[in-house]
Image (cartoon, helix red, strand yellow):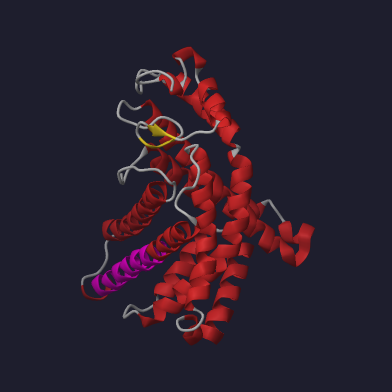
Amino acid sequence: MLGGVSVKQFLKELYQEISEDDIFNGAAALGFYLTLAIFPAMIFVMAVVPFLPIPHVDQAIMDLLRQAMPANAAQMFQDVVQQITGEQRGGLLSLGFLGTLWATSTGMYAVMQQLNITYDVKEGRGFLKARLTAIALSVMFVVLIVTGFSLIVLGGVIQDWLAQYVGLSDWLLWLFAALRWAIIVLGLMLAFALIYYLAPDVKQKFVFITPGSVLGVLALIVASLGFALYATNFGNYDATYGSIGAVIVLMLWLYIVGLVILLGSEINALVEHHADQGKKKGEKVEGQAARDPATRRRVQAVAPEHGGLETKRGGAQ
């Protein structure tokens, strides 16, 4: 039970919210914008990495991408990034820095707009402030990626040292493998938490673990690995689409990423709307809703058996 609502009723409301917010079309839009953003984002990451005193971080990042993404898309992605960073690495951190950062934030800016739809609020931060928020989130992600994989690489260095001087038993190998995935999962959890905290234009507390982020991380890992397995063994996109097949696979994978983000946000929003101290739909701050008539009618239509989310905690506005 959540706020007096059964699991069955919660799932019913979640289905209705997913339909009303049209998250499948929203995920398609995110897939497009993330495609535009992912190359400059990774180029920026790979341009920063050589200045760190930790070797092979770039290889660790690419290794994980090859595990998570379909093989042909991962190979295309790696070839493009390595070609550009190999030729323009110095320029990317000087004159091209702001342009690269702006392009990188494009996908994050699209995520922000979609999460505003989830919470039924209008963007009120102004274009410049919203874009700066998107840039800040993008920079946080760069730091998160580099830090996470630096820890993974350092773990590998420790593992090699132990293998050389101590010798590795099976349980120690298992321990380092578990540590690697623990870092990856914690990094994903933090990424989801930052998105759900900063992206929508609503006032809320930072929460590291939320139902949406937990489900999102699990769904993203399962969906990404499953799609990579399907595309590698069953979906011969190259035979159908030729050389553009790798691009199509990459966009489909990013569509899955966008869908998982939006699904997690819908869960978090609905949990908050049912919580005793949570905001109602359309509120940026508790008790300060700013809705147009169309949003009001949508809110009143949700969960009529329970009087709707609008009437919870004090009645309709």
Residue 74 in percent (x, y) is at 58, 65
Q: Nearer the viewer, residue 309 or 22?
A: 309
Please give left or right for residue 179 compared with residue 268 in the image.
left
User: Overall secondary structure of the magenta stretch?
Assistant: helix
The quarter in which the N terminus is drawn is top left
The quadrant holding residue 237 is bottom right
Between 12 and 229, which is closer to the camera in this rendering? Answer: 12
In reply to whether residue 147 is colored magenta, the answer given is: yes
Residue 69 seen by the camera: yes
At x 73% / y 64%, what residue is drawn?
A: 244
Q: Position of residue 228 (x, y in %)?
A: 58, 54
> Where 17 sits versus 312, above or below?
below
Q: Nearer the viewer, residue 162 or 56?
A: 56
Q: Residue 141's quadrant in the figure?
A: bottom left
Which residue is the extreme one toward the top? 305
Question: Eyeballing the image, is 106 above or below 259?
Answer: below
Residue 41 in view (yes/no)? no
Tell whether 207 sits left or right of 17. left
At which x and y percent is residue 315?
40, 18
Q: Nearer the viewer, residue 236 or 287?
A: 287
Tell me where residue 303 appears, x and y as whole percent: 50, 19
Tell me which residue sits at (49%, 47%) in the image.
123
Q: Quadrant of residue 294?
A: top right
Left or right of 281, for residue 163: left
Q: Is 278 in the magenta? A: no
Report the quarter where the C terminus lies. top left
Q: Is residue 139 above or below residue 193?
A: below
Q: Which residues are magenta?
A: 141-162
- Residue at 47% x, 73% y is 44
